[in-house]
Amino acid sequence: MPQQVDSSTLGMWVFLLTEIMFFGGMFGAYTIYRVMYPGAFASTSKYMEPVLGGINTAVLICSSLTMALAVRYAQIGNRKLIRIFLILTMIFGVAFIGVKFSEYYLHWKEHLVPWMGFQYPEHPEFFRQAQILFCFYFFMTGFHALHMFVGLGLMTWLVIRNEKIRFNEEYYTPVEIIGLYWHFVDIVWIFLFPLLYLIGANK
Amino acid sequence: MPEFHLLPPAAAVSATGYDLLWWYEVAVALIMTVVIFAGVFFFAIRYRRRSESYVPRPIEGSKLLEITWSVIPFLVMLTFFFWGAALYFRNQSAPPDAMNVYVVAKQWMWKVQYPNGVREINELHVPVGQPVKLTMASEDVIHSFFVPAFRLKRDVVPGRYNDMWFTPTRPGRYHLFCAEYCGTEHSGMVGWVTVMEKKDFENWLVSGGAEGSMASQGQKIFQQLGCSTCHLFDEQGRCPNLRGLYGSRVLLNDGRTVVADEAYIRESVLDPNAKIVAGFQKDIMPTFQGQLNEEEILEVTEYIKSLASQHGGMFTSEQTGPTEGGGRGGSIANAGQGTLDTHGTSMTNQPPRAEANAQAQDANQPGAAKPAAPGGKK
Amino acid sequence: MNHKVLPVRTYVLIWAILICATFTTLGVAFIDLGPWNIVVALMIAFTKMSLVVLYFMHVKQTSTLTRLFVVAGFFFLGILIFLAMTDYGTRTWLPAGKMW
Amino acid sequence: MSTTTAVQADTPISYLNATTGWKSWLFTTDHKRIAILYLISITAFFALGGIFATLMRLELTTPQGDLFTSDTYNKLFTMHGIVMVFFFLIPSIPATLGNFLIPMMVGARDLAFPRVNLLSWYLYIFGGVFALMSIVMGGVDTGWTFYTPYSSTYSNSFVMLALVGVFIAGFSSILTGLNFIVTVHKMRAPGMTWGRLPLFVWSMYATSLIQVLGTPVVAITLALVGLERLFHVGIFDPAIGGDPILFQHMFWFYSHPAVYIMILPGMGVISEVVACYSRKRPFGYSFIAGSSLAIAVLGFLVWGHHMFVTGQSMYASMVFSILSFLVAVPSAIKVFNWTATMYKGSVAYNTPMLYAFGFIGLFTIGGLTGLMLATLAVDVHVTDTYFVVAHFHYVMVGGMVFAYLGGLHFWWPKITGRMYPEAWARFAALVTFVGFNLTFGPQFLLGYLGMPRRYHAYSPEFQPLNVLSSAGASILAVGYAIPFIYLLWSLRYGEKAGANPWGAKGLEWEAASPPPTFNFDHTPLVTEEAYEYAPEKEVHVG
């Protein structure tokens, strides 16, 4: 049975609409270059870390589960479980960022950062166009990580808020809308993972 | 005070066609404007407020009217579309007998080169009645080649070729403008297109050309860079035979077929693995990105075109041997550095980006004190 | 605010499906399906997204309005990619027939 | 409509004097006060952009380019564009009149998110500060379009600061749009069905959709240009195989719909003004409302018509060309409906109505020349010439600024509680109209003659028309200065306005002038269609 949403939740959905277009701009540009330079894009696969990426996907899905449960317990007003699940969500979030940054470190060691002495000895013929993919890789995952940081900040606020006021079936909007945001960030990653990590893994 | 014109001179086949469409659109626009202005004025005066207490009877609207004034304008607009699209479509690809001229744009000049080697700056000479095809490349930012008298304009975009063609109809000197904003001296990036009688043009072209033809210069580059060690002119080489290549359809190893045009040759020089000819290996040819500037690539292209056995335009058929061209002093390395100082192109073997980066670093620090513009101030 | 509270097992079930789908994505990526690799990967991603949107984000229970906004986002993103591809997809097309 | 009669007292408490002190303004969450904050700030930016334009017209009176260096001139037109587009036109009607009127028109006490509304003003100011910084430190010379690779690699000016400013102002625009969308969905008074919404609200809703959907794309695009400038490598960089034309696709995906962000609110104002001064329900209410939404959606399908000569595939050009003609249909519907509204009406020639006449005429010319630009072959000749400049000024200035001025006069009594001097206002409207046509009319001819835009020096045969244009600009400047003076004057000396001086319909006219802080004493109950100018009832003229 469809139900009415309140203003704040609707506002969050409209905001997520803008977020879709924000990331969508990059996904669109990515699609075009991928069609233009299929070989160069596929050649990057051996430098990606699909296992780390896969682990990170799983971590983020777990954080989505704990976030959804935090919202669920806010709906029934269980302060203690809200606290536990929010903190679990944050732990998963921090873990994700940790893995992400260790990947960045690995790429930096391999000279795969386009503006920091890019080297591509195995496929010199793709030296140029591979940089486009790595630009996308760093910009897209970077913007995604930025959103993760914002989400973690919001959740810190929520944890404190949870101690001060009681969320219950009448009022759990802040948990709900921060949950929406977190799930959205998860969804972005669900697309980033196959598009960036698994381009030419089969070759 | 110069004399006043409503339209620029019309000096090409395209200009006459475009003007006709233009006048049609102006007529439609004038009629529509008059109708709407008349409606506004008539209603405003006829139904002006005569009494403060009078409130007119409401009128809900009319579906029939709404449909009428949606459909009829749209039908008129469809005539705009089809007429405009037909002219545009016709102007997209040059006829096979078009004469080739090459244009390289850079901040802030137009460099023109004819296949026989004649070079001009900010000038273009063309014969009347002869289709001319310009193949255009940019060394730096986006420019736009605009000749109002031909009613034609085409952006010149870095990293690719854009071409345009026209058939001049009236001798005279006509404006050439850069129409896409390209930096400090954008408004100084202007020149002249001179349309000449065929005879005069041929005389001019001969008197002007002291250097070797573009094809011969291309051939020199071709040999100096060692292209000829693999691209043998028979079917034995490790790389495809280039004789008769230009204009032919090439079967690729992924099953696609492409036409070997200027853009294809350019791509093959700079990005050899992009399109591998069926039956050949990839990763054999190195990229020449950063080793050749746009002009040199055009010369190589012209050389490969000259190898086409088929007929060509006035100049494409001109077969040139390894004759001694005088004016291109010294090695190609010199040519790369000397005649053109371009961004990110040099004859050194270092990756092109490093140099561009270094250059960009000292030029593009927004926080730093304002550096001088690359071309110097006015 | 009176969402029907979903049972915990629903959430856990969705989570389990998502995790399985992730490993499927990873596994399928290493099998050579030619051009179908990307299609399969994107189909799985869309499925995962739909599950998150419908259950974790409660769109299944919410009003048509929210659904409309979700669809609008993808619709306009589709426009961006599709119309840009009309350029990139047809740049090398040759003009058909004689034109002069 | 049910009335909430305002209490008439000698010193009525209104939103203007309910609280005092600068804090009560800078930290207000009252949508009406935020509208005033916006009004002041966009007026300042308009004046700044106007000064740049004046200097440009001054330079262009002679062909040699002798007043400024070419570098200065390039910065002038760039900053004119950036200031006018991002800091005047896009926020103009939405953030001032929209902010003030939408809650009142739907019968609400405030917008859905009053604090977000204030945040959006601060973001606007913050973005504006970056833009001003880029100007003060030496200017930007990329053109407001920021085309790569010039903006990302070659320009030596303060591009970064301008990009950051536009990026931040973009979020202000997004938040305003978001606020309006939620307000229209959630805050309507009982009985205010979608079919009873004033047409201004419809057009603002359509505008908000574009702001929410389009702005993020330009934000990310400009962010990518900024990153490319910062790192000297990026996805538009031709040196590594990047495509500068992709930037244009992404830029115009927003920036063409942004044209509708600028014009749709103006269309909403004109619908209100024409209905009020014809004392008639607008002809074809549902068609005008629907055409706003149609423009918002179709506006996203046409951006490629900015790129017919760039080397975009000719097949794409054809698709974009025909879609561009399609978007002209809803615009035409509006023009015809406004004209038809006057049929058998009772037309008064108050200043807002004069601006509305001007709008209809100038928008018609702007729209018809837009059709020429959408025609593939004609566009090849006139794109990037003064023809384009003239065309979009007819839409942006002849359309949007006229509607803005008309709307400002129309609701001035409501906003300030004072009447403006009618005779002066009519005179100013006339001067603006004449000055405008004299400025931009000749530019159509210049464009077809082949004078490219963004030219600092030009060929001497273009001089007569340029002199004419500059002369017109000076008249136009006078036309803008007069309202500025008498509107300020009226704040103190203007005649006191009643709640409904025009005998208009709409909930905003049922509150006092100026309205109390919470607009209505109690939530209004709407029982009628919008614009119910019933013939049997006497309309009270305040």
Image (cartoon, rainbow, N blue to C red):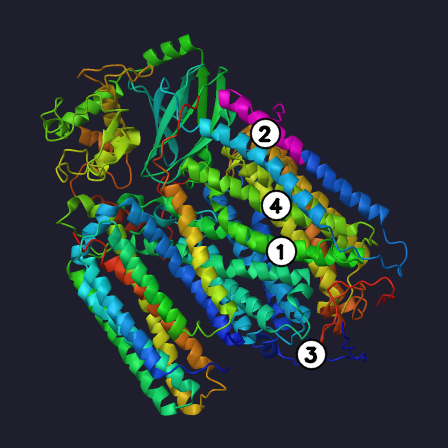
On residue D290, which mark appears? 1
Q: Position of residue D461 (x, y in %)?
A: 57, 27
Residue C69 percent coordinates (x, y): 49, 64
Query: Is residue D48 in view?
Result: no
Q: Which mark is residue D329?
A: 4
Q: Chain of mark 3?
A: D
Depicted B9 relative to depicted D453: above or below:
above
| Position of residue B278 in the picture relative to residue D73 (left or right) | left
Q: CA distance from mark 1 to mark 4?
A: 12 Å
Q: Are marks 1 and 4 in contact (CB under 8 Å)?
A: no
Answer with the quarter of the image where residue D423 lies.
bottom right
Q: Nearer the viewer, mark 1 or mark 2?
A: 1
The mark closer to the camera, 1 or 3, is 1
Asked if the residues shown at circle 1 and circle 3 are in contact, with their CB atoms under 8 angstroms apart, the answer is no
Could one spot residue A9 in this view of the protein? yes
Q: Write down the chain letter for disc 2.
A: B
Chain ID for label 1? Answer: D
Give amino acid for label 4. Val
Q: Which residues are magenta?
A: B1-29
* Residue B22, numbered circle: 2
**Residue B6 within the magenta-colored segment of the rendering:** yes
Question: Residue D523's mark?
Answer: 3
Spatial CA span between label 4 and label 3: 38 Å
* Same-subunit check for callouts 3 and 2: no
**Which residue type does callout 2 highlight?**
Trp
Q: Is residue B103 magenta?
A: no
Q: Quadrant of the N terminus of chain D?
A: bottom right
Q: Relative to D353, does residue D29 appear above or below in the rendering?
A: below
